[in-house]
Image: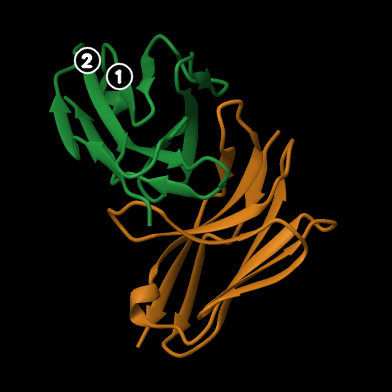
Chain colours: A orange, B green
Amino acid sequence: GQSLEQPSEVTAVEGAIVQINCTYQTSGFYGLSWYQQHDGGAPTFLSYNALDGLEETGRFSSFLSRSDSYGYLLLQELQMKDSASYFCAVRDGPTYTGGFKTIFGAGTRLFVKA
Amino acid sequence: GAVVSQHPSRVICKSGTSVKIECRSLDFQATTMFWYRQFPKKSLMLMATSNEGSKATYEQGVEKDKFLINHASLTLSTLTVTSAHPEDSSFYICSAARWGSGELFFGEGSRLTVL
């Protein structure tokens, strides 16, 4: 079966650093993505790792270890606007018309306090 | 970034009726679109892959006769919830993938309420 595990909730204070972990077990693997979703909004793409290591994009970084089926999203210098749900997502396999089928984890709700 | 538009954003219908939701990629051709369903404070559940010019590929447990998907052009996919029941009430989100990219661009979502 397919499963992605991530913590359900994380709370942190403004200016802090928070790490959201994700472990996965899927039939296929073509990369790990992270998406942010504010309440009532659509998910937006944050980052993607196809190979092991760290990818940095501004205040956000994402890490992948394929041998451990594990990845994490690191958020630095937290701001109140970072309060949202964060989903890890596995690109399970290519479709025959292009793109990759993507399976999402349950999401981690991040609460940033002043 | 790429824009995906979804319409309507909210719809209320009576039990037994059918509802159509449209998903358009506004600035790129999308040979593949995906339909997800999301319950409150829950994950996005992949329902089906919409393939331009051919039949949709449904995930296990999703009734293809109930959730009709049509992808007749490179910029439009539609999801029709047929004979809707209250348990079909949910947030439906479409996404599109640009050719050669795995990044998903999401529509704004459609909140369906079946009375």
| Mark with earlier residue (2, 1) | 2
* Residue marked by disc 2: B18
SS at mark 1 in the image: strand
What percent of the width, then of the height, locates residue A60? 53, 75
Can you say whether B1 is above or below B110 in the image? below
**B34 or A22: nearer the viewer:** B34
Residue type for callout 2: Ser
Can you say whether A77 is above or below A63 in the image? below
Q: Dividing the picture into quarters, in which one does residue A36 lie?
A: bottom left
Can you say whether B64 is above or below B23 in the image? above
Quadrant containing the N terminus of chain B is bottom left
On residue B81, the disc is: 1
Q: Residues within 10 Å of mark 1 (few under 14, many from 20)?
A: many
What percent of the width, then of the height, locates residue A16? 50, 88
The reply to whether the C-beta atoms of the residues labelled 2 and 1 are less than 8 Å apart is: yes
Number of marks drawn: 2
Cα distance, mark 2 to mark 1?
Answer: 5 Å
| Chain label for disc 1 | B
Residue type for callout 1: Val
Residue at 53 percent of width and 20 percent of height: B57
Quadrant containing the C terminus of chain B is top left
What percent of the width, then of the height, locates residue A94? 64, 34
